[in-house]
Amino acid sequence: MIDDPDRPADVHVRTGDGTPVPELTDDVLTELLHEPPDPECPFIVLNRGEHAYIQTRLLPDGVYEIEHRGDDSDERFQVYTSDARLVRDVMWGWVDEDRWWRDAVAWYRVDPAVAEVQSVLADFEDLLDGVSVLDGIQASMDDAMARADELLAMDLDQLSADPDESA
């Protein structure tokens, strides 16, 4: 998975949509950071063991969110940066198990309650995206109702103009 034989082989790499990355090189990681393969899910996830991971995602404003969790803890830590080089270096430091990536960055613990609220908000945004489909339906319904009003008005005008034709 990793291009350097001195790096641990137990690290698995995938993009946000679940696509595995067969070989992670510096060039591949740099490319993935600048242009995620799936803009809808712009994550790069590196796993080691069952629970340990580090991941990054490119946010729409050009800022990267980096998150990590150790194998021995449920605590998650994050940092935000616009420096793609720092993101790359932190991720390689994690792969190499070099402590500098943990010590050199001002990580903050993700509050589980805040994470839950963010999850609910993400679900709500997905729901709202589905509702936006209804906007087109609503516009069509509005057009249909306006046409029905026109037709009804025409019939009433015709009835009032020539009452003998209605009999």
Image (spheres, rainbow, N blue to C red):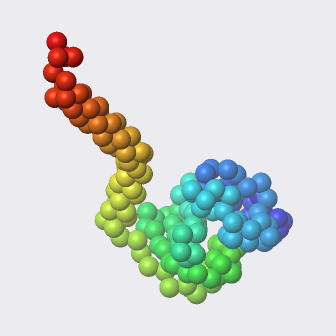
Name above or below for residue 6 compared with residue 150.
below
Task: Residue at 62% x, 82% y: name it.
Answer: 83
- Residue 84 horizontal side relative to residue 80, left or right: right
Residue 47 appears in the picture as rendered: no
Task: Residue at 26% x, 32% y: name it.
Answer: 154
Q: Position of residue 116 (x, y in %)?
A: 34, 60
Q: Quadrant of residue 5?
A: bottom right
Viewer-side residue, 9 vs 65: 65
Viewer-side residue, 45 vs 153: 153
Name above or below for residue 32 compared with residue 124.
below
Q: Position of residue 58 (x, y in %)?
A: 58, 69
Viewer-side residue, 15 vs 13: 15
- Residue 45 horizontal side relative to residue 114, left or right: right
Q: Name the residue at the top extreme.
A: 167
Quadrant where the image shows the N terminus? bottom right
Q: Position of residue 52 (x, y in %)?
A: 56, 62
Name above or below for residue 114 compared with residue 85.
above
